[in-house]
């Protein structure tokens, strides 16, 4: 077997993506396999990845106190100080996990225009010591790695003004340091359009919403956590309520 040279953490051109086994992780669904929930209803937000609910947090702050085993979110670090960060202070973060067997492409959860894309270089195989031994890699540390792992941000201005600006964040877990963005700034997306992919393994992702966005989540009867199971790609994930205008 040919030995591949090492690539730095955060490298978009990670050499492993060219290996034959990456074809499994980047495989595509056949047409019609994952229909988009209510494609003509822009109040319905769909699942951006074939993924299992890990955490749903409201009132997320720019920075938070560190508590042992708590893994609190801090927007400043998750978004690496991006100028758009201030829009999400006090808002909602939904995080979900993609297992190694999952479909690894990302799709737009809303209809809207891509405002900005950004790759943030980070580390891999980092875990919080407070969680103890984790033989599966940083599965137990998904909140923690949302601030330090290689990740990318895709900011989307939704067509529905009750959603407004939202953000999709892909996070590389363990050896996954390739976040492959497939959209460009100014591009208009329909709900369910492909926006990028992970290469070579399981990962995690977040959706960010502003504090004024009133969301009713549909987690398909599950409580977020490490024992949850996949919600299908493009299935209903949340419904936004109309605000008075």
Image (cartoon, rainbow, N blue to C red):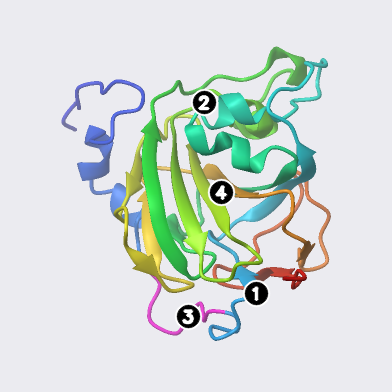
Instruction: Report the span colored magenta.
Output: 28-36
Identify the image quadrant of the C terminus: bottom right
The label number, if any, that marks residue 81 in the structure image: 2
Query: Is residue 30 on the magenta stretch?
Result: yes
Mark 4 or mark 2: name the one nearer the start of the chain.
2
x and y, in percent, of residue 8 in the image: 29, 20
Report how far apart the C-alphas of labels 3 and 2 lie in the structure.
38 Å
Disc 1, SS: strand
On the rendered structure, is 174 left or right of 89?
Answer: left
**73 or 235: nearer the viewer:** 73
On the rendered structure, is 2 left or right of 243?
Answer: left
Disc 2, SS: loop
- State yes or no: discs 3 and 1 in contact (Cβ < 8 Å): no
On the rendered structure, is 132 left or right of 119?
Answer: right
Mark 3: few/some/many CA within 10 Å (<14, 14-19, 20+): few
Pointer 3 residue: 33
Disc 4, SS: loop
Query: Is residue 55 on the magenta stretch?
Result: no
Pointer 4 residue: 99
Instruction: Quadrant for residue 46, please give it.
Output: bottom right
Mark 4: few/some/many CA within 10 Å (<14, 14-19, 20+): some
């Amino acid at each position: 077997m040919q030995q591949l040279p090492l690539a730095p953490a955060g490298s978009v051109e990670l050499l492993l993506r060219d290996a034959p086994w990456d074809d499994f992780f980047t495989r595509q669904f056949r047409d019609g396999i994952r229909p988009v929930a209510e494609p003509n209803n822009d109040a319905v937000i769909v699942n951006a990845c074939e993924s299992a609910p890990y955490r749903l947090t409201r009132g997320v702050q720019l920075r938070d106190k560190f508590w042992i085993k708590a893994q609190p979110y801090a927007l400043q670090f998750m978004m690496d100080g991006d100028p758009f960060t201030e829009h999400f202070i006090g808002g909602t973060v939904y995080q979900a996990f993609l297992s190694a067997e999952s479909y690894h492409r990302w799709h737009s959860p809303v209809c809207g225009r891509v405002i900005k894309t950004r790759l943030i270089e980070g580390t891999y195989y980092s875990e919080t010591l407070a969680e103890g031994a984790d033989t599966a890699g940083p599965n137990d540390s998904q909140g923690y790695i949302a601030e330090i792992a290689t990740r990318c941000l895709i900011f989307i201005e939704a067509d529905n003004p009750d959603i407004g600006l939202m953000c999709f964040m892909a996070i590389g877990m363990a050896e996954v340091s390739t976040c492959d963005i497939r959209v460009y700034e100014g591009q208009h997306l329909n709900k369910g359009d492909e926006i990028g992919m992970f290469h070579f393994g399981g990962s995690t992702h977040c959706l960010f919403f502003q504090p004024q966005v009133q969301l009713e989540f549909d987690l398909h009867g599950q409580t977020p956590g490490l024992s949850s199971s996949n919600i299908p790609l493009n299935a209903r994930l949340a419904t936004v309520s109309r605000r008075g205008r």
